[in-house]
Amino acid sequence: MSNNYFSPTPKISGGALFATFNSKEGNIYWRLLKQIANNQNKKGNFDGANPINVKLSQDEAADVIRAVRTNSTSSFYHKFDDNVTTGKFSYYELDGQDKEGKPTKRKGFGLTVKKGEKEVKIGFTLASAERLSLFLQNALTHIMDAEYAEDIKQAKEYAAKKKDSPQESPEPAPNQEEDKEF
């Protein structure tokens, strides 16, 4: 199952996020693409040849859910060999004006992920951030269900193995006489 988010900007500074999960492996994956064009037909807007790939832990996914619920920030830091990937998902409020010139606040979330020289920024409306939160909740539910099913399977296999193996009867303690009838 995947969930996709697109955030192109007129300044060509946006990005796209493709979120997936594998319940058997217990992993959540993000594939982020940088915006490279802003054309009318939307073809070739994002750089699919140079993605940033991120594998989120279950706690990192839960932290994004918490950030959406509390209008706050979630961040992560991954290091593998000499490669460092950092990410920040944070709530924002920007001052603006409506069509009549009255002051307004634009609210949403921003995701910035950096890996080496690459950086992708994606904006989320409050609705799309909520959708991401629901996707992550669903992913965690499926992962936990798969882990539980595996635990049950292993417990049944262990019980069957224990039942089939011969059990030794305990030996009486030394110098103990058997019960005798008088």
Image (cartoon, grey):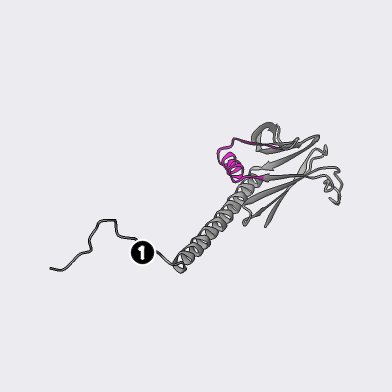
Q: Residue furthest front?
A: 175
Highlighted range, magenta: 56-79
Q: Is residue 102 visible?
A: no
| Residue in view at x 58 percent, y 56 percent | 142
Q: Position of residue 104 (x, y in %)?
A: 65, 33
Q: Position of residue 113 (x, y in %)?
A: 73, 38
Look at the numbered disc 1 and give the secondary structure of its residue: loop
**Which residue in the rendered view is the most extreme toward the left?**
182
On whether residue 108 falls in the magenta region, the answer is: no
Please indicate whether residue 51 sits to the left or right of residue 135 in the image.
right
Q: Is 158 displayed left or right of 109 in the figure?
A: left
Q: Quadrant of residue 23?
A: bottom right
Q: Amino acid at mark 1?
A: Ser
Q: Is residue 31 visible?
A: yes
In this view, the residue in front, 162 or 113, is: 162
Residue 138, horizontal then vertical, whole percent? 59, 53
Image quadrant where residue 74 sits = top right
Determine which residue is flagged by label 1. 169
Looking at the rendered image, the quarter that the N terminus falls into is bottom right
Picture coordinates of residue 172, whole percent (x, y): 30, 60
| 151 relative position to 18: left or right | left
Q: Residues within 10 Å of mark 1 (few under 14, many from 20)?
A: few
Image vertical order of residue 7 relative to residue 175, above or below = above
